[in-house]
Image: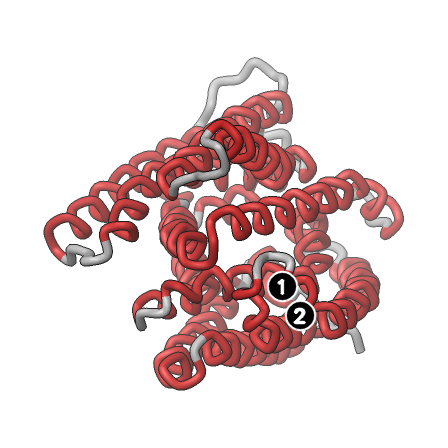
């Protein structure tokens, strides 16, 4: 397959459309939940699901990244039996791990570290039922991305799930004469996850090679690869959720909802980079050895496009951020400075380009791991120091500082190891 920037972008056209629909769905979902539940109950739900997302990311045991990197290589060599074997092995491994995690959480909450806040405890116990569905969704998504079916990977989780959630939440809210409980919101979310998994499974079935071949397995090799990716995935997951989780640990659960909404809007600045990452990841894995020059050129072009789009979004948030947050309720306006700090971090992130993607897809995951470990340590330490003093703004400063460290270090490592410059400059 030849490398052509326009061809790759055209292939990703549907991916851009899906992300646009996802953006609308997420805005509607967060706004609707925040307005009908209030700041405190919304914060409880978001805090409980932050743990689900963290444990779900860990439950893949790095096999999500193995799927993305190895599937494209198996397909190029027409080793279809290995593709099917890897998908089945990853799904089964994930199911075992998620059930184990759910059991540990259940025992911990009830017997080891019982929570005094009954509403939060009940939210944890119910939301953990979503863990197996979320874990499977990550595995199925990664398999589709590895097969270069990015739109099929994203559609179930980014479009189907949030729109289903809003529809059923609205229905129950109206049926209950203008009220909805935490348990009902979590139950709807679990149902939406289950439907998203079913849709993702159907999409993957149509994406897999049609040859009637029996799966073959390289379990030991996949586990070794997965374990190396696992530490990277674990540090990424911990780093991404450290702010929200530590806000709850310091007793600021009522502000988790404000921080969550602010962080979601800030992520819009980095959204173009996330979209291009999902499009270009298989190509980096496929061509980094044979055609590094063209790959680096494509990365540079996409980074510059991402920079222009991200700059425009950042300006919107600076001038309209306070108004946007107020739409979620008066209590959310206090998240403006938090929003700007996080958005600035995302802007710096896109300026450096897809540094993490480049290292993980070019057999240099050990360098990405070192960078992420350092970033995670900085994030946790700064959260401990700053949250008690500055509340959600302290969490935002910690997250942004760790993001700057991660990007700077990985940029230096890429320059030294691969000799390319993925930044906007």
Figure check: 154 above or below 397:
above
Q: Is residue 210 left or right of residue 198?
A: right
Quadrant where the image shows the C terminus: bottom right
Q: Is residue 254 left or right of residue 193?
A: left
Horizontal and vertical percent for residue 87? Answer: 48, 32
Identify the element where label 1 is drawn: helix
Q: Nearer the viewer, residue 3 or 146?
A: 146
The single residue placed furthest to the top in the displayed view is 212
The extreme right residue here reads 6
Residue 227 in sight: no
Quadrant location of residue 19? top right
Query: Is the image coloured rainbow, by chain, by secondary structure, or in one colour?
Result: secondary structure
Q: Residue drawn 70% across and 60% down?
A: 273
Q: Tag 1: Cα neighbours inside 10 Å, few (<14), some, or many (≥20)?
A: many
Q: Is residue 425 above or below residue 185?
A: below
- At 53% from the left edge and 81% from the top edge, which residue is drawn? 401
* Residue furthest front as drawn: 177
The reply to whether the C-beta atoms of the residues labelled 1 and 2 are less than 8 Å apart is: yes
- Mark 2 sits on what residue? 322
Q: Which quadrant holds the N terminus?
A: top right
Instruction: Say which residue appears at 40% left-offset and 59% top-offset.
Output: 234
Q: Position of residue 113 (x, y in %)?
A: 15, 58
Residue, disc 1 = 325
User: Separation of disc 1 and disc 2 at Cα?
Assistant: 5 Å
Q: Secondary structure at mark 2?
A: helix
Residue 73 location (% of width, % of height): 61, 41
Taking depth in this image into account, of 186 and 231 the one nearest to the observer is 186
């Amino acid at each position: 397959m030849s490398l052509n920037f326009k061809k790759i972008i055209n292939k990703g056209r549907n991916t851009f459309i899906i992300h646009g629909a996802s953006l609308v769905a997420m805005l509607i979902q967060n706004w609707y939940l925040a307005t009908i539940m209030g700041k405190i109950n919304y914060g409880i739900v978001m805090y409980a699901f932050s743990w689900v997302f963290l444990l779900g990311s860990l439950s893949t045991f790095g096999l999500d990244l193995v799927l993305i990197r190895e599937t494209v290589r198996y397909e190029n060599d027409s080793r279809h039996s290995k593709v099917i074997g890897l998908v089945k092995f990853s799904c089964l491994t994930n199911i075992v791990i998620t059930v184990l995690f759910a059991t540990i959480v259940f025992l911990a909450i009830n017997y080891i570290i019982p929570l005094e806040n009954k509403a939060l405890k009940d939210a944890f116990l119910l939301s953990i039922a979503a863990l197996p569905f979320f874990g499977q969704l990550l595995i199925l998504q990664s398999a589709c991305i590895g097969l270069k079916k990015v739109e099929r990977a994203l559609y179930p989780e980014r479009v189907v799930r949030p729109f289903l959630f809003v529809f059923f939440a609205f229905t129950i809210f109206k049926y209950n004469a203008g009220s909805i409980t935490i348990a009902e919101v979590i139950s709807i979310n679990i149902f939406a996850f289950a439907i998203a998994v079913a849709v993702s499974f159907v999409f993957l079935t149509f994406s897999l090679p049609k040859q009637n071949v029996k799966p073959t397995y390289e379990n030991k090799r996949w586990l070794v690869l997965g374990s190396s990716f696992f530490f990277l995935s674990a540090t990424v997951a911990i780093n991404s959720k450290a702010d929200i989780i530590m806000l709850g640990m310091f007793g600021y659960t009522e502000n988790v909802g404000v921080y969550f909404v602010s962080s979601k809007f800030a992520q819009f600045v980095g959204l173009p980079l996330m979209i291009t990452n999902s499009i270009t990841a298989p190509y980096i894995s496929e061509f980094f050895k044979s055609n590094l020059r063209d790959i680096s050129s494509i990365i540079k072009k996409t980074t510059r496009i991402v920079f222009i789009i991200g700059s425009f979004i950042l300006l919107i948030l600076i001038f309209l951020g306070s108004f946007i947050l107020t739409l979620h309720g008066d209590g959310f306006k206090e998240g403006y400075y938090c929003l700007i700090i996080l958005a600035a971090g995302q802007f710096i992130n896109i300026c450096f380009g897809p540094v993490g993607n480049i290292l993980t897809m070019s057999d240099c995951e050990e360098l990405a791991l070192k960078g992420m470990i350092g970033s995670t340590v900085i994030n946790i330490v700064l959260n401990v120091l700053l949250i008690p003093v500055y509340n959600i703004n302290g969490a935002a400063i910690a997250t942004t500082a760790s993001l700057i460290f991660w990007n700077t270090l990985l940029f230096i490592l890429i320059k030294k190891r691969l000799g390319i410059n993925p930044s906007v400059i």
